[in-house]
Amino acid sequence: MNNIETVCKKMFRLAKGTQCEVLAERREGALTRFADNVISQNVASSSTDFSARFLADGRSAKINFNQTDDDSLKRAAASGLAILKKQKKDPDLLPLARPRALAKEKNLYFRETAGLTPLFRAEKAAELAKACKRTGQTAYGTFENGATELVIANNLGLFARHTETYAMHGVTVRDRDGFGWAEYPAHDVNEIPFAGLNDTARAKAAASRSPKEIKPGRYTVVMEPAAAADLLSYLAVYGFGGQFYNEGRSFICGKLGKKLFSPLLTLEENSLDGPAAGMTFDYEGQPRGKVPLIAAGVIKSPVHDRKSAKAAKTASTGHALPQPNSMGPIPLNLAVKPGQGALADLVKGTERGILVTQFHYTNLLKPQVVEMTGMTRNGTFMIENGRITFPIRNMRFTQNMVEAFANVEAVSGTAVPCAAWGAVSCPAFRIANFNFSSSTKF
């Protein structure tokens, strides 16, 4: 019998009739890191971690453990039940969830990806390093892979399991004072375009040499998918989380059904079968649904867990995080509807603007309007009369994202997987009047 199932059954017996929920996560992963054109680190890890939540008489207690012999489980259960008795009553505490039918999962587990060897990762690092050495460039980056299994079960009969694999190749290339970057996450390693990523990072690094400083101000900006996904993930989390909405802390409060964004922006939360698929259930074991967040610029709906849904007098969309938590439900599988044309077409349509490869150090300044700040990185270029004319020094932006995505002028026709808050499938964007508040010295 699967060890996780055995642990769940033993913990339920030890709960002695008290409602008990067990969350278990098994993770096996490996990473190869390279710098200065040589491998600098190779690590692998394997772990199985558990938490148990006990509920009784309006009280709850949660414990974490990773030892599963009988004595350790007895100590964990005894500790949890003892803590439970000392907790204050919560009038809003919900009982554990009953089992509900779940959608059939999209296959996200690939044996080849789970079993990649250190030699395979080293060979991929070597391909980039050798090419960089020939041209006097320097390669940095990581290639990681692994597999996860997540189980949520309770003693009311609920049992849900999700397995998936992951691989991600992320590379940065330095060419004197020029830098280029590319990254691609995937469940199936065979989907990663290794050669294309390497070529992109090398070409950007070469083109970024001797960057010029330009004046801060408002520019048309062409964001490559990773840059746009970074900003959209903040917009989705802080705008469409059910708890933020219920507490009046979201920009969509009082705006359902109203047009706040460009008609070119359509955003869906879809973990079931879309390009950003993931778990078909949430962290209470409840079925996740497809949720339209923005349809042609119109605000549609926040996401909910059972608690926020009850407060809003609506139905849960299956977006609970591990309980308890202070953030409430959030969307974690975002799919942006592509538009038309290629990234090059977005550049051609720009009279004067900035091309951004990547943002970093992005942070939230004002959650209610999703005002953010951050910096460009690893390939920032001036666009004039539809052409990339010269590299520029990195810029800091300070921008209200509700305003920014109301100013979308164009969306590219191809969405790619990006790593942000969860999974995001995102195309490139052209946005007018984006505020670059200052330049940097690097």
Image (cartoon, rainbow, N blue to C red):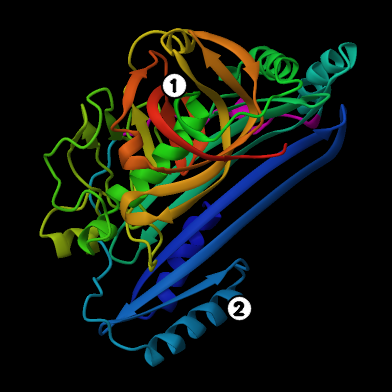
- Give how far apart the Cα atoms at labels 2 and 1 are: 55 Å
Query: Residue 290: image x %, image y %?
Result: 25, 36
Q: Amino acid at mark 2?
A: Asp
Residue type at mark 1: give it.
Answer: Ala
Instruction: Point out the frontmost of discs 2 and 1.
Output: 1
Q: For the view shown, which residue lies furthest in the bottom direction?
A: 86
Q: Nearer the viewer, residue 90 or 210?
A: 210
Let me know if residue 231 is in the magenta part.
no
Nearer the observer, 315 or 85: 315
Q: Is residue 11 above or below residue 225?
A: below
Q: Quadrant of residue 411?
A: top left
- Decide which of 70, 326 is in the foreground and name it: 326
Residue 397 placement (x, y as % from top left): 51, 40
> What's drawn in magenta, residue-wise?
104-118
Image height check: is 313 above or below 424? below
- Circle 1 is placed at which residue position? 428
Instruction: State whether residue 60 is above or below residue 229.
Output: below
Is there CB contact under 8 Å for labels 2 and 1? Answer: no
Upstream in the sequence, badge 2 or badge 1? 2
Q: Which residue is mark 2?
A: 71
Residue at image position (45%, 60%) is 23
- In the image, what residue occupies the spot 60% across and 21% down? 381
**Dot 1: within a 10 Å radius of its alpha carbon, few (fewer than 14), some, or many (20 or more) residues?**
many
- Residue 402 image point, x, y percent: 31, 41
Q: Element at badge 2?
A: helix
